[in-house]
Image: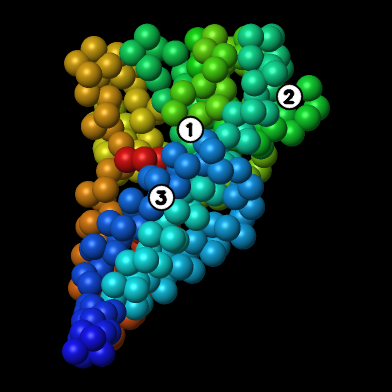
Amino acid sequence: MWRAGITGQSVRIRILSHRKVGTSWLLLWVSVGILVGTYAALYALGFTGFEWFVVGLCFSFVALLNRTYVGVALAVCGGLLIGLCNGGNQLVQQSAYEPLIGQEITAQGRVTEDPSYDSEGDLRFRLKDVRIQDREIAGELWVATSDRVDIKRSDDVTVTGRLSTGFGTIPAALFRADVRQLERQDYADVARDTRDWFADGIREGVREPEASLGSGFLLGQKTALPEKLDQELRLLGLTHIVVASGYNLSILVRYGRRLFSRISRFTGLAASSAMVLGFANITGFSPS
């Protein structure tokens, strides 16, 4: 009787190990693992290497292929490793800026994405590849300035100001910075140049402010808005509508699937993915 109970239990375990789990549930468990791992990075150090991130991705990919209860365990482990790696790197970036908080500094860096204006008209942008006192520092630097300068994505900028504690995933910030130097290299950002060339063509055929507003909807080029229209949008709290949103991506995906799915499903998927990546590269990888 005892042997029969053991046999029945092993059969149930075998059935559970082969029962299929939905892909959405596996993605949920990966997300849960990432959240737990990011919080656990406060107490578990040593997972900052890129190899841990790769191992976490491999575990998550195998889990999505397996799609069983064993895959759930792999999904959680993969998410934990990704979260530990991400959280550990964020802590490393914050520790690099901490000794400089409160000091007047001069920082050089490259603009990561299109600048934007806040409700008071200050220009805001983020810098990567930051150098402070001729020393490279990991992580991005958030900058706000009242200087009226024509800053674009991928420009090399030198700013000065008092360094303050950052927010969110930004380790440090300069809230009242002065722009000392601006350099724009040729062919540094071909996608940006292509977008600006296309936007200039729109302005030749469409009058303002409709041309700039359309460029904002289509290409996310919100810094080119006329000053009057920009002030009116900020006054009404509608500046968020002048972005290239996810709806643009859904149009590209549907178009790619309809055009190329007749060849094969893989071709449709590949074409849609290429269109999405190309569009994101042109407009910038902003959250919107």
Q: Position of residue 249 (x, y in %)?
A: 28, 54
Q: Nearer the viewer, residue 137 or 280?
A: 137
Amino acid marked by disc 3? Ile
3 and 2 marks in contact (CB < 8 Å): no
Q: Residue at x 42, y 56 (%)?
A: 79
Residue lying at the far front of the rendered structure: 1
Q: Position of residue 119 (x, y in %)?
A: 33, 13
Amino acid marked by disc 2? Ile
1 and 2 marks in contact (CB < 8 Å): no
Amino acid marked by disc 1? Thr
The quadrant the N terminus occupies is bottom left
In the image, residue 180 sits, relative to residue 43, either above or below, namely above
Q: Residues within 10 Å of mark 3 (few under 14, many from 20)?
A: many
Q: How many marks?
A: 3
Q: Residue at x 50, y 10 (%)?
A: 146
Q: Earlier in the sequence, mark 1 or mark 2?
A: 2
Image quadrant where residue 234 sits: top left
Q: CA distance from mark 3 to mark 2?
A: 32 Å
The residue labelled by disc 1 is 169
Q: Nearer the viewer, residue 234 or 127?
A: 127
Relative placement, left or right, of 20 versus 273 is left
Image quadrant where residue 268 sits: bottom left
Mark 3 secondary-structure assignment: helix
Q: Position of residue 279 (x, y in %)?
A: 38, 54
The residue labelled by disc 2 is 132
Mark 2 secondary-structure assignment: strand
The residue labelled by disc 3 is 34
